[in-house]
Amino acid sequence: MENEIREIQEALERSGYIAEPPIATAVHLARSMQKPLLVEGDAGVGKTEIAKVMAEILDTDLIRLQCYEGLDVNTALYEWNYQRQLLHLRVGQDTGRAAGELEQEMFGPDFLLARPLLQAITREDGPPVLLIDEIDRADDGFEAFLLEVLSEFQVTIPELGTITAKHTPYVVLTSNRTREIGDALRRRCLYLYIEHPSLEKEVRIIRTKVPGAGDRLSTEIARFMQRLRARQMSKVPGVAETLDWATALVNLHRDGLDPESVRLTLGCIIKDKHDMRDLDEAAVTSLVHEAAVTE
């Protein structure tokens, strides 16, 4: 068991995802138990990236369903290609074909537009990774429908009948906790909560993802971010913002932090006008001083 977890952890890191044993264990169990993995945490901590890296290390497709308010079943599952159906009907009528025959053809597989859930269920050459991103943005009705799909991995299309998955997809659901996910869905899933990274981990992430950032710059950026997140903020920056900032500073040929460079590049990490206003010149200078690497 320990060897398997270590192998998963090493595979994740080879794909650029710095993972602690709890993350590697969750990925291993989701794969071996064929249970959905619900990943929660603040925006930018690497929830979505888990699914992307899983697809890479399993050498399979990633199918992504981006959730949003008002998402309905048709958008997530399937739709009929109405334009193509109408064209087929007109051509058939022009050639004198029977209406019943045309209707039967119009509601066949050739006119079906598979959306992410159906794509995952009907994939024939091995199980894909199905990412259901930001499930907390969808409403309760869609969550109930999703629970039914994840329980059986089959769907019924009235015109075609019941379609059952030949290969059970690996499912990763993410949530930023903008609303509470229902207990029924939680019970169906394994659970993983991802915190903002520790200082050591954030330095490793920067060095892995932004190779041009030297040891000093990587360390000072990570220290700055750790102290910044400790402040009262409307939108706490995540690892994604850290990497954007590191890339920007490398592009500006900086090998360490200084107050002027930080003020000029704050838009990489601060995404709220109130947070930008609160981080005045004195605060920036203080944070840079605290983050400095002394020789």
Image: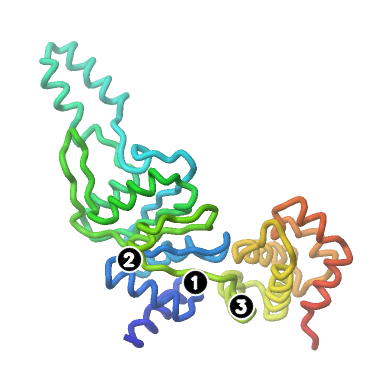
Q: Residue at x 81, y 64 (%)?
A: 261
Horizontal arrangement in the rendering, residue 43 relative to residue 95 (left or right): right
Task: Using the image as rendered, state which of residue 253 and residue 264 is in the foreground.
Answer: 264
Would you place residue 7 above or below residue 166 in this image? below
Q: Earlier in the sequence, mark 3 or mark 2?
A: 2
Asked whether, in this view, residue 187 is left or right of residue 239, the answer is left
Q: Give percent across and percent down for residue 90.
A: 23, 15
What amino acid does circle 3 point to?
Ser
Mark 3–mark 2 Cα distance, whole angstroms, equals 30 Å
- Please tell me how crowded label 3 is: few (under 14), some (14-19), or many (20+) other residues with Cα within 10 Å: few
Choose between 147 and 75: the one closer to the eye: 147
Residue at the disc numbered 2 = 59
Residue at disc 1, secondary structure:
loop
Mark nearest the camera among 3 and 2 is: 3
Identify the secondary structure beneath mark 3. Answer: loop
On the image, which quarter does residue 169 sit in? bottom left
Residue found 76% across the figure and 59% down from its top: 266
Q: CA distance from mark 1 to mark 3?
A: 17 Å
Q: Secondary structure at mark 2?
A: loop
In the rendering, at what x and y percent does residue 242 appear? 65, 66
Quarter holding residue 250: bottom right
Q: Amino acid at mark 2?
A: Asp
- The residue pinned by badge 1 equals 16
| Residue 106, disc | none
Indicate the position of residue 19 as horizontal and vertical percent values.
48, 76
For residue 198, which numbered disc appears in the image?
3
